[in-house]
Amino acid sequence: FERLPDPANHSAYLAAELDGDLTGRDDTSRGAACALGLDELDALSCSRAGYAFAELTPEIQDAMLELVEAGNLTSVKLNLAAWLEELRHWAADASVAAR
């Protein structure tokens, strides 16, 4: 699993875009899918590790995301592997747009 490059000058832009999606600023279903994926990832994190995903160390977060990517950590509500891939594409596109 490789994290997207997160240069300091792009992180604020990406955070604002994600915030906009989660608060419904965009007109697509991307915000709803993003929120559902984050909720599912958090629920799996709480059930498997006992902590919210954001409270985990980066190493444990990476391990969980690798399990999702490989299809070994799944959700009934959402194909998390496909969601993660879509999130990567969206973040890469947003990063390019921020330049």
Image (cartoon, rainbow, N blue to C red):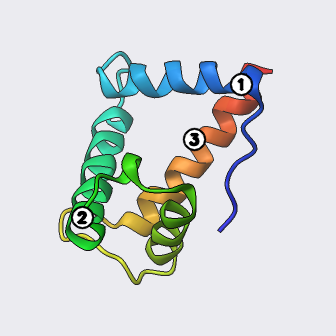
* CA–CA distance in space, label 2 to label 1: 31 Å
Q: Quadrant for the C terminus, please.
A: top right
Q: SS class of the residue under badge 3?
A: helix
**Mark 3 or mark 1, earlier in chain:** 1
Q: Position of residue 12 (x, y in %)?
A: 61, 19
| Of labels 2 and 1, the one closer to you | 2
Find the distance from the CA under tag 3 to the CA under tag 1: 14 Å
Residue type pointed to by label 3: Trp
Relative to 57, 49 lies left or right: left
Q: Is residue 68 above or below residue 78?
A: below
Q: What residue would you read off at disc 2?
A: 50
Hey, what amino acid is under mark 2?
Gly
| Circles 3, 2 touching at the beta carbon (< 8 Å) | no
**Which amino acid type is shown beneath numbered disc 1?**
His
Query: Which residue is drawn at the image coordinates 68% and 41% (left, top)?
Result: 92
Disc nearer the start of the sequence (3/2): 2
Q: Are marks 3 and 1 in contact (CB under 8 Å)?
A: no
- The 10 Å Cα crowd at callout 1, few under 14, some 14 to 19, many 20 or more, is some
Q: Position of residue 73 (x, y in %)?
A: 36, 77
Residue at numbered disc 1: 10
